[in-house]
Image (cartoon, rainbow, N blue to C red):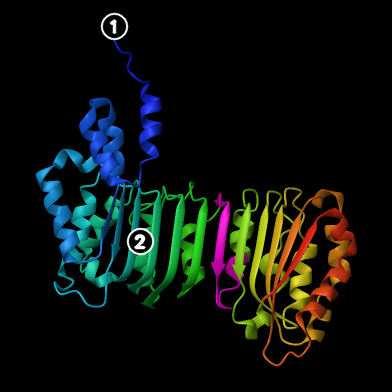
Amino acid sequence: MSVLPLPQELVDETIDYLWDDPKALSSCSLTSRAWLAAARSHLFRTHRLNDHTCYYRLECFLEKYPHLVHYVRTVHVLTFMVDQGGLSWLKRIPSLLSRLVRLQEVSLGRICWSHIAPDAEHAQTLFTSLAECKRLSLSDVKFESSAELCSMLAAAPKLSSLHMYRVAWHRHSIPVSVSPVPPHSYLKQLVLYSVSSANTVVDALLLPGRDLVLRNVMLNLGGRDVECLGRIIRASSSTLEELHVDVGAMSRIANWTIGCMDLTCVPRLRSLHLDGLILPACGEWLSEVLTRISSARLKAIKLSILLAYIGGLSSVEWRQIDRCLAKPQFQGVSMTIYLSLAIGCTPNKEIASEIIFNSLPEFRKNGSLAVVCL
């Protein structure tokens, strides 16, 4: 009696459950030809290069088994302060990436751009390898000029996710391009956390006359470049679903006008998270933001607030917010307020929580309210 083979879809799904078990995947790859491709796609998908040893191990592996190159999808490059082999291996990264024909994700961490791209030839080789890249993450990366970063972003027009953490450059300069810069028509997720100039990044992503299709945005501007928040919201107003803003640097709250964050024209917004708020400094601004929400798809609001003193709660127009969020379109919305009392703030936590609860009676009938005192 012949044995019917399992459907390939079932084989692939079964092996997908073993994605983090190298031993099991290795066994699967040796069991059947039908299992080989699915098992190898997990075994060789991701590579982390932390030092010269990791790099040369991967380079030798690909030279010995060149037919496995097309299984590599993700490369993480993260250097440490002390590397016994030096940092000369970093300048070989562009050449390595250019060989990975199906590269989808690149992550660079703790790197000086001059080490990985010491000249124009290395930079161009790296840029070419990003043409089909879907996800790019830069963490603690130092560029010589903003033009290098802009050129890098222009070389990756198919990005769906861009994460930048503590990215800096020594000087501002305009990149020289001989060909038109393609639009970032696929970018769905943008995370900017402490960059030298958020406006420079937005300028590189947002072309004249073109909108973005961002769905998830997370920004920490440190009180600078606040106008770029408004630019991002307006450019992706028809698609934006999740917005997380760390206000930060509240000493500059005067710069945060309502024009920086007008949510009246964001019809698909589902989640809003505002972090780093201080009362009473930002009470008026916070009130304006919450009362201008218009999305009927809204599901959750999260606020992280530092209360300087108990009277600071009165800086927020709670009654006005209560009337707005009690509308039928906001039925079922959950609001969570994480409240921290400043050192020296004598009232106990229950008093602050009670004030907020009593100030939003209609909203509590329409949705749910939770005040978490930290």
Identify the element where label 1 is drawn.
loop
Residue at position x 28%, y 9% in the image: 2
Assess whether residue 219 is covered by the magenta stretch.
yes
Q: Looking at the picture, how far across and down is residue 273, in whole percent?
A: 65, 64
Q: Is residue 336 above or below residue 17?
A: below
The chief SS type of the magenta part is: loop
Image-based side of 36 in relation to 146, left or right: left
Q: Identify the secondary structure beneath mark 2.
A: helix
Q: Is residue 171 above or below residue 214?
A: below
Question: Is 69 placed above or below 49 here?
Answer: above
Q: Report the residue that reaches farthest toward the top.
A: 1
Give residue 24's position: percent from left, percent from top. 29, 41
Query: What's the mark number on residue 151?
Result: 2
Over which residues does the magenta segment extend? 210-229
Amino acid tagged 1: Met
Picture coordinates of residue 263, whole percent (x, y): 71, 59
At which x and y percent is residue 67? 17, 38
Q: Residues within 10 Å of mark 1 (few under 14, many from 20)?
A: few
171 is higher (above) or lower (below) than 72: below
Q: Amino acid at mark 2?
A: Ser
Of label 2 and label 1, which has the lower sequence position? 1
| Residue 349 is a magenta residue | no
Is there CB contact under 8 Å for labels 2 and 1?
no
Q: Which mark is residue 1?
A: 1
